[in-house]
Amino acid sequence: NTIAGLRGWTQALQLPGADVSRATGRIDFLSRQVEREIRDHRTLLLAENGQLVAEHAPVQTGALLHDAQVVFSGHPAARDRRLELGPPADDVELLTDRSLLLRILVNMVRNALEATPPGGAVRLRCEEEPGRGAVRFSVHNAGAMPPEVQARVFQRSFSTKGRGRGLGTYGMKLVGERYLCGEVSFTSTPAAGTTFSIRVPARLPPLPVARLGGWCR
């Protein structure tokens, strides 16, 4: 679908009186979309084969939330919808793979925005759990998933929007738990809405992840 969109806009660009600014903007967005989907698919294949390498380094939670917010500035999924950051939390330093964690958060936010009607809001927040030596990131939207969807959310082949779209919920759980040593989960009820979250340790487990071939569990 993304490639078809690219072809359509490049053809439109060649027509007399073409809106060059609009066409080039869409081509730029769609080409970045293709790049993201290829990168996410490669990450998923490497993760399943035990070949993904997590590069752990100090990460500030405040900067990570800001980066996730910037991704959706002008993003089509956020059109007529709001992405809100939760109550300010202390800026905590984690030792984790920034790129992998950001991609999981971006997938969670995009899914929540796509499930939110125009005029609605999605909330992204971060909470430190000092007693557990961990930090929890969560993404909330007001909608609720039917029970039959909830039962299949983390299955590899399941998607509510078609196959081959980014990491997907299966990929988020696989990468988040096996390579970031975290815990990916969700809750969904008509009264409280839907919240996806990932809890990651503030520091690496005692046993070096590298000795496990990148697998935490």
Image (cartoon, helix red, strand yellow):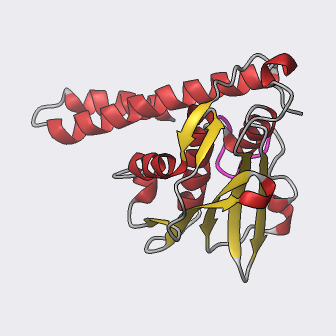
Quadrant into which the C terminus falls: top right
Q: Residue at x 28, y 28 (%)?
A: 11
Q: Residue at x 57, y 25 (%)?
A: 39
Depth order, front residue of 104/133? 133
Q: Is residue 73 above or below residue 186?
A: above
In the rendered image, residue 125 lying in the magenta stretch gets the answer no
Percent position of residue 194, x then y? 69, 68
Q: Residue at x 48, y 52 (%)?
A: 62
Q: Is residue 9 above or below residue 47?
A: below
Q: Residue at x 61, y 30 (%)?
A: 40
Q: Is residue 42 above or below residue 119?
A: above
Query: Which corner quadrant of the image does residue 53 belong to?
Result: top right
Q: Is residue 194 left or right of residue 5?
A: right
Give the total of numbered labels.
0
Percent position of residue 78, x then y? 43, 58
Percent position of residue 216, x then y? 84, 32
Residue farthest toward the bottom in the current orientation of the protein: 191
Q: Is residue 89 left or right of residue 20?
A: right
Query: Which corner quadrant of the image does residue 6 belong to?
Result: top left
Magenta segment, prevailing SS (helix, strand or loop): loop
Question: Which portion, as a residue range, is magenta?
Answer: 157-164
Depth order, front residue of 161/186? 186
